[in-house]
Image: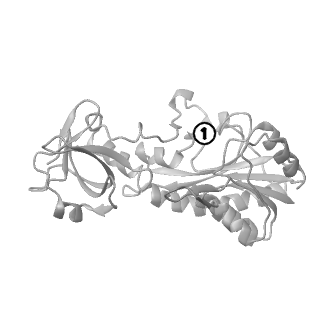
Amino acid sequence: MRIVFMGTPEFAVESLKKLVENKYNVVAVVTMPDKPVGRHHDTLQASPVKQYAVSQGIPVLQPEKLKDEAFLEELRSYHADLQIVVAFRMLPEVVWAMPPRGTFNLHAALLPQYRGAAPINWAIINGDTETGVTTFFLDHHIDTGRIIHRVTSPIADTDTVGDVYDRLMYLGADLVLKTVDDIESDNIQPVEQDRVLGDIPAESLRPAPKLFKENTEIRWSQHTVKSAYDFIRGLSPYPAAWTTLRSADGKETQLKIFFAEKYAEAEPENPLVVKLRDGYLRITDLQLAGKRRMPAADFLRGAHLEGSILVESNPTTNLG
């Protein structure tokens, strides 16, 4: 069976490696164009998937546009029986409908929940205690196709996105391999997502929209201790929850927060405690704009926080 693999980040590399190491015939890889990096954007950096594919001698396609006829003609030339997508882009029908055995995607959530670009983040932000990975066939809409397999994984109360990302990367690679094995042996019975949803109303589905600066700001006045704690770890280490620190002289600087601890009562003489309506959060890991990430203890050695507050669009919350 001839396979074309599509993906870009490190998360996708583990699935590609599983296929290669298990002797599947990956005839080509499709990934994003090399990205300009460096201070002057004068150096091109290949994606993790491209780097691995090149190391294995696998041909690499890097289209700017997925409907470009030159790309489509080259993709057809590989006569793939199956296409696999892991952390790539939304495909047009002319691409996903090309191979006779279809195109399946690995999604880092238990579909039909968390359709969208940031499923791991939103599962943690929402305080879920379980997540997982799903393989499903692509169709005309985002993350709505027939489900092939799902595997669950717990989320611990102290897990960050980085922790869950790593676990799902390996769990997902195993599921990709199982899915390919089962497709090759005609041992699959794909299920429509409406059947998986069962009696749960459609309005109960939680989305996983893309993360932007606007939806990663901690709006303290809207949070309980638990929801602020989950919000912070649901964005750590990337892109990181952020807030604004305003000093007594009115100077403002952005502050990224990577982890915090929950308390029913404030610790005495600790200026990095945020008072919320039902308790306190102690910030333990942070980064000031233009500085390196650091433990709060290192930050405090050189900080002068008297009179400082954390500010948001409307209300303010005392720091300390």
What count of labels does the image hold? Answer: 1
22 or 182, which lies in front? 22
Q: Is residue 174 visible?
A: no
Of the pair 229 and 312, the residue shown nearer to us:
312
Q: Foreground residue, 9 or 249?
A: 249
- Kind of residue at disc 1: Pro
Quarter assignment of residue 243 = top left
Q: Residue at x 45, y 53 (%)?
A: 238
Callout 1: few (<14), some (14-19), or many (20+) C-alpha neighbours within 10 Å?
many
Q: Residue at x 21, y 64 (%)?
A: 297
The answer to which image quadrant residue 219 occupies is: top left
Please give left or right for residue 148 compared with residue 205 in the image.
right
Using the image as rendered, state which of residue 218 and residue 185 is in the foreground: 218
Q: Is residue 227 visible?
A: yes
Its colouring scheme is one colour
Q: Could you say where residue 311 lies in the image, as x and y percent from the top left?
A: 24, 38
Pinpoint residue 25: horizontal percent, then vertical percent.
83, 65
Q: Residue at x 66, y 45 (%)?
A: 89
Residue at 51% across, 36% down:
206
Residue 157 % position (x, y): 37, 55
Residue labelled with disc 1 = 112
User: Would you say 78 lies left or right of 240 here?
Assistant: right
Q: Is residue 52 above or below residue 74?
A: below
Residue 237 picture location, percent across and down:
42, 56
Please identify the quadrant where the N terminus is shown.
bottom right
Q: Secondary structure at mark 1?
A: loop
